[in-house]
Amino acid sequence: MENSCRIAVLVSGRGSNLMAIIDAAERGEIRSKIELVISDNKEAYALTRAKEHGIRTLFIDPKEFKTREDYDRQIVKHLKEHQIELVCLAGYMLLVTPYFVQEYKNRIMNIHPALLPAFPGLDVQRKAIEYGVKVTGCTVHFVDEGCDTGPIIIQRAVPVLEDDTPETLSARILKEEHNIYKEAIRLFEEGRLVVEGRRVRIKSGRNEDLSLKID
Ligand code: GRF
């Protein structure tokens, strides 16, 4: 992969995580390139953002396929045509099928706005407030056959404040989502993520080794 890889981002909505990845690539914070953005939703604002940055976009309509697996076969076909090495789900509302997971084993990442395994699924910022947790956060994980169950790559904690609403909490979590997604991509492109069962070991990079010596 030579410290850079060909990325596809799958989206359904506004695409702020997509935008964070685009920004990171344009600023040189990651070396990988987004080759393709795919959406199951024609109206996704993420598609507009991608086009504005000269990225190829594709709307694939789930309604045109008999089964979810047929749909994923179509997506995988496009991914392979574009020699995609890493798939980033960013606000993608469909669950990927086992077929897709097997085709891209440990090469599909997802961002989730809670500290998994707490609060999987949807509307989790509201659920965190209602449950009364004092700390929540976000998780980047590899995607397996379950819903939000794959091996965890990076997590970041975010405190829940007394007067938080789902909106204010979501906004603070989102900032951290944008930070950890690009970090996870950087670790991936540097070949530093090693999946060992449920655990993802992060191999130290050259810079880390140096800073250890200086300290
Ligand atoms: C984010 O909160 C992400 O964690 C969740 O869906 C939301 C997508 O937001 N999976 P955006 O489309 O990236 O702005």
Image: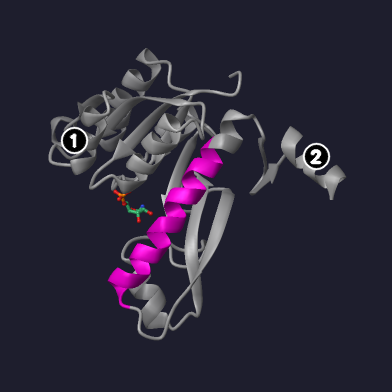
Return the x and y of residue 87 as percentages of the image width and height: 43, 32
Could you tell me if the residues under marks 2 and 1 are in contact, i.e. CB atoms within 8 Å?
no
Horizontal arrangement in the rendering, residue 86 relative to residue 54 (left or right): right
Location of residue 56 by image quarter:
top left
Q: Nearer the viewer, mark 2 or mark 1?
A: 2
Would you say 196 lies left or right of 154 here?
A: right
Q: Residue under circle 1?
A: 48
At a point 47% along the width and 41% down the height, the residue shown is: 109
Residue 113 position by quadrant: bottom left
Q: Which residue is mark 2?
A: 209
Residue 65: x, y in percent? Answer: 18, 31
Left or right of residue 120: residue 53: left
Does the stretch in magenta take in 25? no
Instruction: Identify the element where label 2 is drawn.
Output: helix
Residue 196, x across and y down, in percent = 69, 42
Magenta highlight on residue 180: yes
